[in-house]
Each structure stands twice: as C-alpha cells, then as structure tokens.
Image: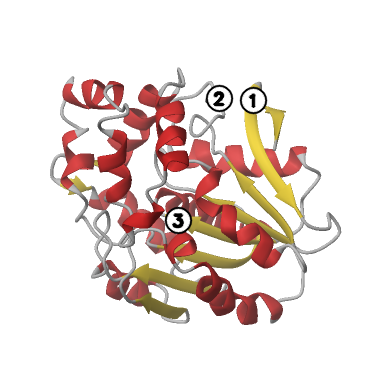
Amino acid sequence: MKTLLVRGAGIRVHETGDPAAPPVVLLHGIGRSLEDWAPQHSRFDTDYRVISIDMPGFGLSQRMPAPTSLAVLADGVSATLDALGETRPAHLMGNSLGGAVAMTMLAGTPERVATLTLVNSAGFGKEVTWTLRLLAVPGLGRQMLRRIDARTAPRVERTLFRDRALVTPERVAMAIRIAQQPDFAPVYLEIAKELGGFRGIAPGWRTALLASLAASTTPTMLIWGDRDMILPSTHLAAARAAFPHARAHLFPNTGHMPQLEQPDEFAGLLRPMLAEVAV
C-alpha cells in the first residue's frame, strides 16, 4: 500500500504486478475501500499491472476540495493514475458506485478505457436498499453514519454477502476504521445526494450518463449476484439494454460483491475479454 498526493489529497493505492504490463484498475463502492478487490490482485497480477484505489474521500483516502460528485470521483481516479505514470487505456472494473464512476470515466475520457466491467453497478434502476434511502433524510443520514461501530458494522457487512463467512473480524474492523475518517460522512452524504434520495436512485443522472454511452463499442462485461440486497439483480436486464454489445453473467447464490464471493470464477470470466484487447 502507498499514499500518493493527488490534487492536494492523500490517495491510498494498492499496486501489484509488472508496471510494464497492461493496467487493470479496480474501483470500490460507496463507503467502501480497495480491500473489496483484494482477492483479484493475485488472480490478475501475473499478467497485468493491477491497481486498486481508495477513491477520494473513501477508504483511507482524503477528499478532493470540490463537493463530491461522479465527475469529481472520476477525475480523482484519472489523476491518481497520472500520478502513478499510468496513462495507457486501462481494463476498468467498478463495483456498485465504482461502476458509475467507471462509466463516467468512459463517457468523459474514452481513450483511457480499454475494457469496462460493471459489477452490481449503480446506474440501472431506482431500487436500492432502504438503508441508503434513509441516509438521504436530512439529519438522519449523518446520525446513521456516525453510529457505525462494533455493534452496527457487522449488520451492515452482512447485507453485502450471501456467504456470511465473509463477514470477518478484519472486514468489520476495517469498516469501523473507515467510518472514523474525518471525510467519511460528508463525502458519503454528498455523493448519496447526487445519486438519489428517499425515493431511490434518481433517474436524471442515470438517463444522461447512459445516453452519453449509447454509441460506445468498448468491450464490456456486466456482472451481478442474484442475491444482491443493495442493488437488485433485476437491474441486470436494464444494463443489458443499455449495453447491447456487452457480455453478461449472473452469479447464483451471490450478493453485492461477486469479486469477493466468487473470486476464481470472477477472474476466469473476465480473463478472455481482457486478453482479446491489446493495450
């Protein structure tokens, strides 16, 4: 792990593999960290430069000066790659909010994206867990985020996985540590407000973002877990309609993070698409 100074903010990065190898870039979800991609490093770094990033204001990274938005997060990821000296088109993978950030990068800087992998991604429907809806209630959201502790963190973690064995003491401890970061609550609430509210994920940004990608021919993989309690797997149909050229896979008995619950199958599914694209 290392921390880079990016636009005046300390951004935490995990990098493995040969720096000369084609880049794979991994983006986590809202309120999460690069640890959500940990098993995929060893499954790709024999052939790729694998870079996972705590996006600005999340994980153990500091926030950017501007209010947090999809555009600010996408710019922060691009600037982090620049700081690493990585300017080649990347195999970009995003989970949940990270998927929306990845799509924003593809829309704004398509030359930086070799392939796109969306994993239980935000952006394809209004339905979302009630926990995230309640965060949009003025005052209540900040109180809820301040109460992530040894009692509440395990409950939050259990909503992410079908396999409860993945709710380890280490993951719970990391969730508490992240919630204690000074930028965590304000950044979480800023991006949550942009994405939606009490009624669910807002249609405006979703419609505009998908419209901007309608003509995209970037090789794309759509992945979901059929037991996702955060963003339901019914969103996969909308994702396939938005990306008619994409490949798609629905993992059975899997929750919000197939890259953690099905690490071998996840990597095996993606390697053929990555190998087809020269970087």
What is the number of the mark on residue 95?
Answer: 3
Labelled disc at residue 30: none
Q: Quadrant of the N terminus?
A: top right
Quadrant of the drawing holding the C terminus: bottom right
Decide which of 228, 174 is in the foreground and name it. Answer: 174
Residue 82 horizontal/vertical position (percent)? 74, 42
Q: Is residue 99 left or right of residue 206?
A: right
- SS for callout 3: strand
Is the residue marked by circle 3 packed among few (<14), some (14-19), or many (20+) residues within 10 Å?
A: many
Residue corresponding to mark 2: 62
Label 3, label 1: how many angstroms apart (C-alpha)?
22 Å
> In the image, what residue type sits under mark 3?
Asn
Q: Position of residue 203 (x, y in %)?
A: 24, 52
If you read the primary sequence from the N terminus, does the residue marked by circle 1 or circle 2 appear first? 1
Q: Nearer the viewer, residue 47 or 239?
A: 47
Q: Distance from label 2 to label 3 (Cα)?
A: 20 Å
Give the vertical position of 114 relative to 35 (above or below). Answer: below
> Which one is earlier in the sequence, the residue at label 2 or at label 3?
2
Residue at 42 percent of width and 26 percent of height = 184
Residue at disc 2, secondary structure? loop
Q: Which kind of residue does numbered mark 1 sit on? A: Gly
Q: Which mark is residue 10?
A: 1
- State yes or no: discs 1 and 2 in contact (Cβ < 8 Å): yes
**Which numbered disc flags the more N-terminal residue, 3 or 1?**
1
Q: Amino acid at mark 2?
A: Gln
